[in-house]
Image (spheres, rainbow, N blue to C red):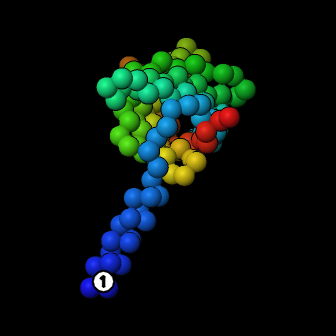
Amino acid sequence: MNRRYALIALLGTCLLMADPLAGGKYTGKWEGASGGSGDFRMTLTPAEEGKWTANISFSLGGQEVKCTVKSLSVDGSKLRAVYSFDLQGNQLESTIEGEMTGAKLGGKYTTKTAGDGSAVDEGTWATTAAN
């Protein structure tokens, strides 16, 4: 009997650790395996029927890079977004996957060229809700 209650308590604790994703502004940092890093900003807006929209931008070398979100999915505390951007005349596409844990939203990203899909960079991103 005690094992069953311990298992239920453990499962309940795990469920509480992952908070549902909330709409709003998120700011933080990204860091790539290539050595690049910068600011990362995202605004998430929930819409009807479970659809969400996002605005995403980041900085690289002091320059602001605006992105065009191609797809976005939110499932409870998890987020996946694909966005494209122009970087010094190169068309690139990044995919981010992350999860809301407490007040933090973050995860991993991969970037590839939009043309042939060649790998460009990968790394991590981490944000917190902005006031």
Residue pushed farthest right? 62
Q: Residue at x 44, y 45 (%)?
A: 20
Residue pushed farthest bottom? 2
Q: Position of residue 110 (x, y in %)?
A: 45, 37
Residue 29, placed above or below residue 16: above
Q: Residue at x 54, y 52 (%)?
A: 102
From the viewer's side, name the closer residue of 129 and 1: 1
Amino acid at the residue labelled 1: Arg
Left/right of residue 131 with respect to residue 11 in the rendered view? right
| Residue labelled with disc 1 | 3
The N terminus lies in quadrant: bottom left
Q: Position of residue 8 (x, y in %)?
A: 33, 71
Residue 65 visible in the snapshot: yes
Residue 92 visible in the snapshot: no
Q: Residues within 10 Å of mark 1 (few under 14, many from 20)?
A: few
From the viewer's side, name the closer residue of 108 and 46: 46
Q: Position of residue 101 (x, y in %)?
A: 51, 51
The quadrant in which residue 95 appears is: top left
Residue 53, placed above or below residue 26: above
Residue 23, placed above or below residue 97: above
From the viewer's side, name the closer residue of 86 and 116: 86
The C terminus lies in quadrant: top right
Label 1 sits on a secondary structure element that is: helix
Give the mark count. Answer: 1
Q: Residue at x 40, y 23 (%)?
A: 47
Left/right of residue 29 with respect to residue 11 in the rendered view? right
Residue 90, placed above or below residue 76: above
Left/right of residue 38 with respect to residue 83 in the rendered view? right
Q: Residue at x 70, y 28 (%)?
A: 61
